[in-house]
């Protein structure tokens, strides 16, 4: 039985796509299907996907759709068999227990939408934990009314949400994920939201984004903390020296038996450090 349907849209990035797929194959749960949606691919992407030879991986070779290809994503999602829908950017990576930890959040029937704590990673190997708990009312309002700061790879929701609020907005020029998330959360409210406290995935800079300053504002603030504070957990500085893509180097590092645990522990230490620093600020006394 298929529990998870994972949507993975892609356009001409086979050099990182194969690593994203490997991170799915490495999951501690095996009751998934992977919907790889080729949005007008003109290279060997199809051969890379089909080369895995796994019946759970379904390849959709579609003509280029408008914008980010939201209409093509809907073609695949209409065929999704899983109870839960997850997302994966072709340049991002799951931790091995991503589906396990995210899926556990839906043990409560009222939960419709879950978010794990995203980890943004710079090309130099700096991991930037961005802690935005949507269960906090002002944070929820900011998300619903002002801006999106949740990467799709950190999201999971029930397949049944599509029946109530619809699929991805096919005519949107951008921010189609944010549009969908807001519709689901408007439907279920904060009682239907679950926050998974641990990081479960790594979000890399897309190759079309500018080098510096990408990511939400808090991630940029964390870069400033890293550069000026004089203290940064070693586990959040991954060694990416040498040639090759960041995803390739990080994937290699993640094969170590304690790598994920060390990153999570370092993220917790950073959170504790920032909380202590804020507590020493006279404004908080």
Image: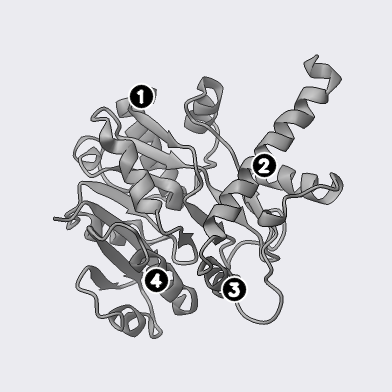
Residue neighbourhood size for the residue with mark 4, other residues' Cα within 10 Å, grouped as few (<14), some (14–19), many (≥20): some
**First in sequence: mark 2 vs mark 4:** 4
Residue position for label 4: 22
Seen in the picture, residue 199 relative to 76 is either above or below; the reply is above
Residue 243 position, x and y percent, is 67, 82
Residue position for label 3: 249
Residue in the picture at 51% in, 43% down = 117
Residue position for label 2: 269
Q: Is residue 268 left or right of residue 229?
A: left
Q: Is residue 176 left or right of residue 282?
A: left
Residue 12 in sight:
no
Regarding mark 2 in the picture, which secondary structure is present there? helix
Which circle marks residue 189 in the picture? 1
The residue closer to the viewer here, 148 or 137, is 137
- Which numbered mark, 2 or 4, is in the foreground of this view? 2
- What is the spatial separation of the Cα atoms under label 1 and label 3, in whole angstroms? 40 Å
Regarding mark 4 in the picture, which secondary structure is present there? helix
- What is the spatial separation of the Cα atoms under label 4 and label 1, in whole angstroms? 34 Å
Q: Residue furthest top?
A: 285
Regarding mark 3 in the picture, which secondary structure is present there? helix
Residue neighbourhood size for the residue with mark 1, other residues' Cα within 10 Å, grouped as few (<14), some (14–19), many (≥20): some
Residue in the picture at 55% in, 32% down = 146
- Which numbered mark, 2 or 1, is in the foreground of this view? 2
**First in sequence: mark 3 vs mark 2:** 3
The residue closer to the viewer here, 47 or 73, is 47
Q: Which quadrant would the C terminus be assigned to in this image?
A: top right
**First in sequence: mark 4 vs mark 1:** 4
**First in sequence: mark 1 vs mark 3:** 1
């Amino acid at each position: 039985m298929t529990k998870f349907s994972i949507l993975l849209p892609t356009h001409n990035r086979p050099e990182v796509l194969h690593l994203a797929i490997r991170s799915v194959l490495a999951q501690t749960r095996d009751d998934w299907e992977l919907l790889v949606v080729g949005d007008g691919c003109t290279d060997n992407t199809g051969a890379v996907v089909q080369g895995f030879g796994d019946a759970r991986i379904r390849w959709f070779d579609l003509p280029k759709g408008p914008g980010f290809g939201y209409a093509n994503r809907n073609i695949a999602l209409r065929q999704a068999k899983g109870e839960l829908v997850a997302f994966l950017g072709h340049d991002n990576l799951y931790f091995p227990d991503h589906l396990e930890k995210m899926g556990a959040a839906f043990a409560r029937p009222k939960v419709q939408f879950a978010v794990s704590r995203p980890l943004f990673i710079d090309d130099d190997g700096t991991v930037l934990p961005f802690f935005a708990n949507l269960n906090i009312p002002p944070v929820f309002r900011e998300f619903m009314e002002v801006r999106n700061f949740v990467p799709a790879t950190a999201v999971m929701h029930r397949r049944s949400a599509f029946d109530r609020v619809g699929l991805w907005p096919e005519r949107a020029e951008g921010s189609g994920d944010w549009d969908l998330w807001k519709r689901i959360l408007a439907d279920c409210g904060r009682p239907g939201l679950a926050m998974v406290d641990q990081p479960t995935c790594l979000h890399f800079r897309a190759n079309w984004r500018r080098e510096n300053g990408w990511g939400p504002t808090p991630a940029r603030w964390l870069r400033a903390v890293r550069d000026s504070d004089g203290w940064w957990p070693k586990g959040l500085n991954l060694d990416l020296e040498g040639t090759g893509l960041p995803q390739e180097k990080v994937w290699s590092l993640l094969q170590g038996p304690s790598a994920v645990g060390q990153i999570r522990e370092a993220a917790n230490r950073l959170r504790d450090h920032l909380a202590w620093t804020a507590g020493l600020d006279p404004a908080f006394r």
